Image (cartoon, grey):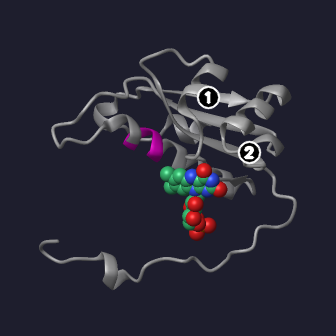
């Protein structure tokens, strides 16, 4: 979790909290709030990333809470991989039910859930389905 704490954030605001869920019955309820995605109840720990000032907007018009939490949780995915742990970004969950289950106060937003655990089998690198660079790179304008 220290990789998460050390992540950069807009103006170093660190407007975030992280909830580690390892209680079996709570994970079962979270699983139901997350479209019954099996790893939510199977993983030993599910990390919830919470933006504590989610309505803030930067001068560029972008909400920093979502960006900050995304960077922090991506630190977690990379650090976990170094440790031989598997993760999955979970964006398909019910915001209201999840906040209620985790006692997240109004005015905060759960940005993502992230199951964390040792994979049953060795992780093998697999081909990534991605757009070609030419499709996404532009020079000097869109
Ligand atoms: C914002 C976001 C939300 C996602 N939500 C889910 C999810 O709810 N369930 C899931 O299994 N994967 C989820 N993913 C994982 C993506 O589906 C996955 O990264 C993408 O299909 C590419 O697969 P790959 O990373 O294995 O190449 C999410 C990823 C992101 C970035």
Placement of the C terminus among the 4 image quadrants: bottom left
Instruction: From the image, give the main secondary structure of the stretch colored magenta.
Output: helix
Q: In the image, which disc is placed on residue 98?
A: 1
* Quadrant of the drawing holding the N terminus: top right
In the image, is residue 121 part of the stretch drawn in magenta?
no
Residue 132, compared with residue 41, is above or below; it is below
Q: Residue at x 25, y 42 (%)?
A: 62
Residue 130, percent from left and from top:
49, 77
Residue 36: which numbered mark, if any? 2
Left or right, 55 with reference to 90: left
Q: Residue at x 57, y 76 (%)?
A: 128
Residue 84 screen position, x and y as percent: 75, 57
**Residue under the image location 67 percent in, 77 percent down:** 126
**Element on which disc 1 rests:** helix
* Left or right: where 17 falls relative to 98: left
Counting residues from the N terminus, which is met first, the one under dot 1 or under dot 2? Answer: 2
**Residue visible at 67% across and 35% down in the picture:** 33
Observer-nearest residue: 45 or 29? 29
Q: Look at the numbered discs 1 and 2 and tell me whether their residues touch, using CB distance below 8 Å.
A: no
Residue 9 quadrant: top left
The residues colored magenta run: 67-71
**Looking at the picture, how far across and down is residue 79, in whole percent?**
62, 51
Q: Is residue 91 visible?
A: yes
């Amino acid at each position: 979790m220290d990789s998460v704490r050390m992540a950069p954030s807009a103006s170093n605001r660190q407007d975030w909290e992280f909830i580690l869920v390892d209680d079996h019955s709570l994970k079962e309820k979270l699983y139901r709030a997350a479209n019954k995605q099996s790893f939510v109840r199977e993983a030993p720990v599910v990390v919830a990333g919470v933006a504590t000032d989610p309505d803030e907007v930067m001068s560029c018009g972008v909400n920093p809470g979502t960006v900050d939490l995304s960077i922090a949780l991506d630190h977690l995915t990379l650090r976990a991989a170094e440790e031989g742990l598997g993760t999955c970004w979970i964006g398909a969950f019910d915001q209201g039910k999840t906040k209620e289950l985790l006692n997240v106060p109004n005015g905060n937003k759960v940005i993502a859930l992230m199951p964390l655990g040792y994979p049953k089998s060795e992780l093998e690198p697999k081909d990534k389905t991605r757009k070609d660079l030419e499709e996404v790179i532009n020079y000097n304008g869109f």
